[in-house]
Image: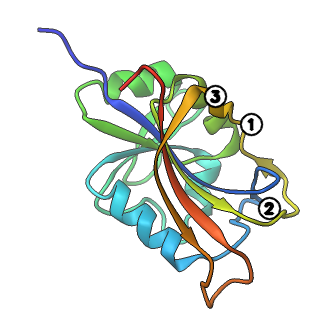
Amino acid sequence: MTHQKPVLSIIVAIARNYAIGLNNELLWHISNDLKRFKQITAGHTIIMGKRTLASLPNGPLPKRRNIILTDSPGEQFSNCESASSITAALEMVKNEKEVFIIGGGSVYAQFLPIADKLYLTMVDKDFEADTFFPEIDFSQWQLIEKTVVEDDPQNDFRYTFETYERLGTI
């Protein structure tokens, strides 16, 4: 029996200058983005690095299978599964339909070349940061959905929710 590999999806909010974090924290609070993230990832497996796990205020995310990438063999995390490499993580999810990569920077950089889908929140502002998303070659991607939010009363910037599929993979 052959296994169909899961759709590998990256979900991330990115500033104009590709900034995604500072001091292991998000750079902004966008309620609509957090709701979208929860709606899209609920019921799925999420893969993240251990610093991203440490940044979550309440630990592992509920209603999802949490897989943590760690370079320390045997390292365990409460209510999570551990994978020592991307290859190991992919083996753990080989029977799933869609899997989400949720950060951080180095994890995104490793998965971007093999990702099938991008769920982006593009924040129309530059931010000071110490963690950045790798540059995206948009010529390899097709925009399949876009929603512009210009009037969020919680923020002084506009942002867009964009979904892309890699050309020729899905």
From the image, which quarter does the C terminus lie in?
top left
Q: What distance separates the C-alpha of mark 1 from that of mark 3?
A: 12 Å
Relative vertical location of residue 31 with respect to residue 33 in this rendering, above or below: below
**Residue of label 2:** 23
From the image, which quarter does the N terminus lie in?
top left
Are the two marked residues, 1 and 2, in contact with CB atoms closer than 8 angstroms? no
| Residue 57 x %, y % | 55, 71
| Residue 128 x %, y % | 88, 62
Relative vertical location of residue 74 with respect to residue 125 in this rendering, above or below: above
Residue 125 quadrant: bottom right
Relative vertical location of residue 4 with respect to residue 50 in this rendering, above or below: above
**Residue of label 3:** 139
**Residue of label 1:** 135
Q: Which mark is residue 149?
A: none
Mark 1 lies on a secondary structure that is: loop
Are the two marked residues, 1 and 3, in contact with CB atoms closer than 8 angstroms? no
In-image side of 128 versus 52 (left or right): right
Badge 3: how crowded within 10 Å, few (<14), some, or many (20+)? few
In-image side of 147 versus 72 (left or right): left
Mark 2 lies on a secondary structure that is: loop
Residue 165 quadrant: top left
Badge 2: how crowded within 10 Å, few (<14), some, or many (20+)? few
Name the front one of labels 1 and 3. 3
As drawn, which residue projects farthest toward the bottom? 153
| Residue 69 x %, y % | 53, 36
Instruction: Give 61 or 29, whichever is nearer the viewer.
Output: 29
Instruction: Give 17 or 105, whichever is nearer the viewer.
Output: 17
What type is the residue that disc 2 sits on?
A: Asn
What type is the residue that disc 1 sits on?
A: Glu
Query: Residue sitting at 49 percent across and 75 percent down?
Result: 32
Q: What distance separates the C-alpha of mark 1 from that of mark 2?
A: 21 Å
Disc with the residue nearer the chain's start (3 vs 2) = 2
